[in-house]
Image (tube, rainbow, N blue to C red):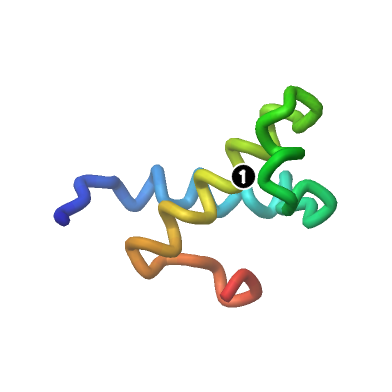
Amino acid sequence: MAYSITPQRIDELKRFLKEHPIDHAYDEQAELFDGDCPPEQLAARCAHELLKQIGKLPEDEN
């Protein structure tokens, strides 16, 4: 699958992850989707997965 994502957007996603690190207290699947998870936590997880898929995770996130 090809991605079309700019270097600027990659930097934004990395910065977002740094400012909103994944909180592993929400690792249980049920807790993520029961409404108690902050939107920033869901966005951080999506950013992490996207960066992982394109091989651009920050070194400290590998």
Along the line of sight, which residue is nearer the eye, 5 or 54? 54
Residue displayed at 76% across by 32% down: 37
Report x, y in % for residue 39. 68, 28
Q: Is residue 57 toward the left or the right of residue 22 in the image? A: left
Task: Specify the quadrant of the image occupied by residue 32.
Answer: top right
Along the line of sight, which residue is nearer the eye, 43 or 31? 31
User: For the view shown, which residue lies furthest in the right direction?
Assistant: 25
Q: What residue sits right under mark 1 in the picture? A: 44
Task: Specify the quadrant of the image occupied by residue 30.
Answer: top right
Residue displayed at 84% across by 52% down: 25
Report x, y in % for residue 61. 62, 70
Q: Is residue 58 toward the left or the right of residue 21 in the image? A: left
Q: Amino acid at mark 1?
A: Ala
User: For the view shown, which residue lies furthest in the top direction?
Assistant: 35
Residue displayed at 78% across by 56% down: 24
Residue displayed at 39% across by 46% down: 8
Q: Is residue 23 toward the left or the right of residue 32 in the image? A: right
Mark count: 1
Along the line of sight, which residue is nearer the eye, 35 or 40? 35
Quadrant of the snapshot with the C terminus: bottom right
Report x, y in % for residue 12. 50, 44
Q: Secondary structure at mark 1?
A: helix
Along the line of sight, which residue is nearer the eye, 31 or 52? 31
Picture layout, residue 42 above or below residue 61: above
Picture layout, residue 16 above or below residue 59: above
Q: Quick one: label 1, few (<14), some, or many (20+) residues within 10 Å?
A: many
Picture layout, residue 2 above or below residue 43: below
Quadrant of the snapshot with the N terminus: bottom left
